[in-house]
Amino acid sequence: MTDNPTGSPTENSPLIAAARAFASFVEPGDRNAEIAQLGDRAGLVLVHSPDDFDPHFARPDKGMTVCAQQVYRVLNTEMAARVSVLCTACETTAQRIATDAGATERTV
């Protein structure tokens, strides 16, 4: 494995391979529910960028995704309900944000 100064898994890592294998067994509806719950916990919305077709997470008031791509459009409720894949970097960042938000709530 190559060095990765960000600490997040690289595209070729065993962790990413395992996550993709697991995702192939999950029903799209279940996966969509996981993505929606993660977005709610992290306070993020689903968006598209002009650079690829994968949905991304972004803060509702920002023009950039959490993986630093430009927001092309925010997905409406109907489009968000069909999402079953997500940018890996956005998912990892959202998990960190949700974890940090949960820790903050417990200490307040």
Image (cartoon, helix red, strand yellow):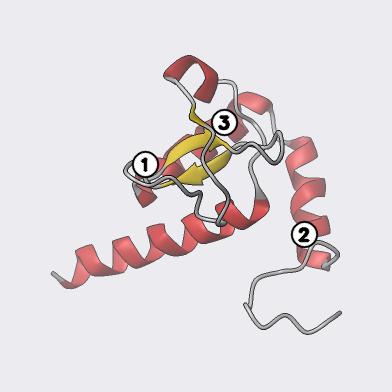
In the rendered view, tell whether residue 15 sits above or below residue 44. below
Question: Which of the marked residues, 1 or 3, is nearer the chain's N terminus?
Answer: 3
Q: Position of residue 59 (x, y in %)?
A: 38, 47
Residue 40 numbered mark, or none: 1
Residue at (48, 55) in percent of width and height: 94
Side of 1 where 37 appears, left or right: left
- Along the line of sight, which residue is nearer the eye, 27 or 67? 67
Q: Secondary structure at mark 3?
A: helix
Q: Amino acid at mark 1?
A: Asp
CA–CA distance in space, label 1 to label 3? 12 Å
Which image quarter is the C terminus in?
bottom left
The label shown at residue 32 is 3
Residue 18: quarter of image: bottom right
Dividing the picture into quadrants, the one containing residue 72 is: top right
Q: Secondary structure at mark 1?
A: helix
Task: Determine which residue is flagged by label 2.
Answer: 16
Quadrant (top left/top right/bottom left/bottom right) for the N terminus: bottom right
Give the percent coordinates (x, y) of residue 41: 36, 48
Query: Residue 106, relative to residue 36: is it above or below?
Result: below
Q: Residues within 10 Å of mark 2 (few under 14, many from 20)?
A: some
In the displayed structure image, the side of residue 81 where residue 101 appears, left or right: left
Q: Amino acid at mark 3?
A: Asn
Find residue 90 and name its label: none
Disc 2 versus disc 1: distance between alpha carbons? 23 Å
